[in-house]
Amino acid sequence: MREVFQNELKEVQDRLVEISTDVTNVMKNATIAFTTSDVTVADQAIASADAISEKALTLDELVIRILARQSPVARDLRILVSALRMSASLERMGALASHIAQIARFRFPGSAVPESLMPVFVEMGKLDVELGNKITKLLANPDVDVARSIQAEDERVDELHRGVFETVLADSWKENAMFTVDVTLASRYHERFADHVVDISAKVSYLTTGEWSE
Amino acid sequence: MREVFQNELKEVQDRLVEISTDVTNVMKNATIAFTTSDVTVADQAIASADAISEKALTLDELVIRILARQSPVARDLRILVSALRMSASLERMGALASHIAQIARFRFPGSAVPESLMPVFVEMGKLDVELGNKITKLLANPDVDVARSIQAEDERVDELHRGVFETVLADSWKENAMFTVDVTLASRYHERFADHVVDISAKVSYLTTGEWSE
């Protein structure tokens, strides 16, 4: 029975890793779409986010079946409850990345981001993709050092997010309202994406160390 | 044993109703703060949202303890898993309302919303408070008619949200970038708040009717 359960937990973990890989690819494509106005890549990102929703739903059903069959307690129970929450975070990350791709799609053939902010969004996208890769790694193999570097990278994303607001609210900002709206929302989506990575990372650390760091 | 379990489920339900009531009050105060630049009410909203996070965390712990003690299956298990998700949605709704209050706080003593959009934000706030009241009612006592009216009200919030973008992107929009940023984000928060109400309502309906409507 224990061995069956361990195999089931492994299956849950593998699927989380798979979804996290997909999510990271969506953010990669969304960033390309947003910073190069590539509508084909935008469409790919949007379609992949829908597929992620399906995978998350299927994973949730698997977790509920395991809960019903195995009636786990203590740490095993917490792993499964955490899996449900991580699946929800990953699904949301896919949706946030998809929103960024949708902005790019909507402004096509124009750009959603003015030249002055281009480097910021290139870096934000790069950081979010890195965060995605790190959370995938962490889900596959818990490692306290990776968890720590996630924290630092999230702080950099927050800093860039605040920088976007400073740029937009400065007297020197002469772009039209469309640019203002697009960069405000896209920056917010990047920031939320990174927040979810931190949330997932806290859950993985909790399961590994038993200590919850909010 | 069954009676103990029923009492525990009732306790979970009561707490969801309590948190939902709190969340609705936060949105009420956030809307007052946002549309009348009342900084005291904004502070109240922000503090209450923090208290909601605590209550949601405590509720989650209770649900996990029940799962461990009772090892529920079938519908009982799904009720508890849904409770965890509803608690997450309610917490997020509190945070979204708090963000609206924070914008008001940040712009004080100025207004975060120009006169031209004031009626829209008054209506959005009113609708979100109504949605909050309805989801509280639904959590206390599942009712298909209430679920249906939630759907209709969410559509109206979406319509207003799109209207904000249309206003901001029109040639007639002459407000500065600060207003553009504030109304873009606040409108988005209102829309997400309503989305979460729809999510919770779908879960309640599912538990009542056994049919999942996405």
Image (cartoon, coloured by chain):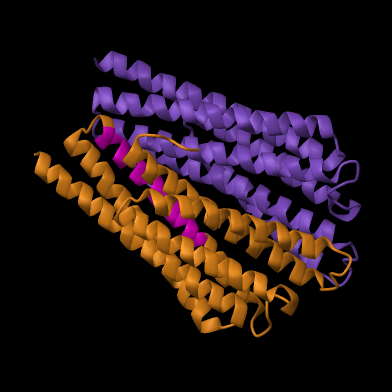
Chain colours: A orange, B purple
Which contiguous range is marked in magenta?
A75-95
Which of the 4 image quarters holds residue A122? bottom right
Up the image or down, B151 lies above or below B137; here it is below
Up the image or down, A10 lies above or below B28; here it is below
Up the image or down, A18 lies above or below A151; here it is below
In percent of width and height, residue A123 lies at 60, 70
Q: Quadrant of the N terminus of chain A?
A: top left
In percent of width and height, residue A9 lies at 22, 47
Q: Residue at x 73, y 77 (%)?
A: A114
Up the image or down, A128 lies above or below B58; here it is below
In the figure, is residue A165 to the left or right of A86? right
Q: Main secondary structure of the magenta part?
A: helix
Q: Residue at x 58, y 30 (%)?
A: B52
Magenta highlight on residue B80: no
Q: Residue at x 36, y 19 (%)?
A: B8
Residue A53 in view in this figure:
no
Q: Nearer the viewer, residue A118 or A211?
A: A211
Which of the 4 image quarters holds residue B110? top right
Q: Nearer the viewer, residue B32 or A172?
A: A172
Magenta highlight on residue A80: yes
Count of labels shown?
Answer: 0
In percent of width and height, residue B214 lies at 44, 52
Which residue is farthest front? A145
Residue B173 in view in this figure:
yes
